[in-house]
Image (spheres, rainbow, N blue to C red):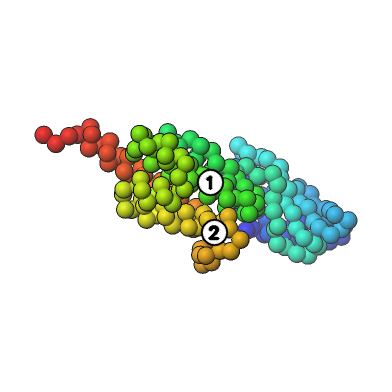
Amino acid sequence: MIKRQISFANHGYQVDAPDPCPICHRHSEIEVTRADLIDSGKGVQVIYRCAYQNCRQFFFGYYSKIGDPTLIRTSPIKPNSSSFPECIIELSPLFISIFNESEEALQIGLTQIAGPGYRKSFEFLIKDYAISLAPEKAAEIKTKFSGAVVNDYIPDPRIQAVAKRSLWLGNDETHYLRKWESHDIDDLVNLIKLTTNWIEIDHLSKSYIKQMPEA
């Protein structure tokens, strides 16, 4: 966070301003345009503007009370979507779509919705990958539980290992009690991305082996 001075109704103090910009995601100068009380004086709202020439967007920053510098949230935001290899996009477009929606939910603070969304996205990824390996078993794979798909149709031990842990944490996001209390949604996202990395390695390895057969 960066500090900015705000003033209104004879009050002046410093607050934590957003950094980077929630619209363009650049670490640029954030200008204070105006500040005032909201919610019958129970909160403070600040109108900010990004100074980056190709952005220049206005957005709001919200604070709980006069004198409290802690930024609660900003609005609106433009989600900063993760990028994935082309082979993953082609393999499972619904995984990409659901993952991006979950990422957007997380970035606007909807953590209780984001977790189950990430879990759902991973199910599409791992089932689409399994179907790509055994297309003749597609109907069976679609109806199986994801854990059984990982055990029965994912032969690579590296992919299987990280996929299992993705499911463990994904299930924690949908259950009343958590089993893996020392791990959170950030670990789930990391494991999902790690799984896509291993799938990409598998895809590229098979592609080059096919293009360059041994004499």
Q: Position of residue 209 (x, y in %)?
A: 22, 37
3D distance between C-alphas at marks 1 and 2: 12 Å
Residue at the location (55% across, 41% down)?
98
Residue at the location (76% across, 51% down)?
46
Mark before the other along the chain sequence, 1 or 2: 1
Give, as a three-letter code, the residue at label 1. Answer: Lys
Q: Position of residue 214 (x, y in %)?
A: 14, 36
Residue furthest to the bottom = 182
Residue furthest to the left = 215
Give, as a three-letter code, the residue at label 2. Answer: Asp
Kindly identify which numbered label has been placed on residue 157: none
What secondary structure is marked by label 1?
Answer: helix
Q: Position of residue 71 (x, y in %)?
A: 70, 58
Q: Position of residue 180 (x, y in %)?
A: 51, 65
Residue at the location (45% across, 45% down)?
144
Q: Which residue is mark 1?
A: 120
- Pick the residue in front: 178 or 102: 178
The quadrant of the rendering that contains the N terminus is bottom right
Q: Which residue is mark 2?
A: 172
What secondary structure is marked by label 2?
Answer: helix
The correct choice, above or below, for 30 with respect to 42 in the image is: above
Q: Is residue 51 left or right of residue 171?
A: right
Residue at the location (35% across, 34% down)?
136
Q: Is residue 99 left or right of residue 49?
A: left
The quadrant of the rendering that contains the C terminus is top left
Q: Is residue 194 left or right of residue 62?
A: left
Q: Quadrant of residue 208?
A: top left
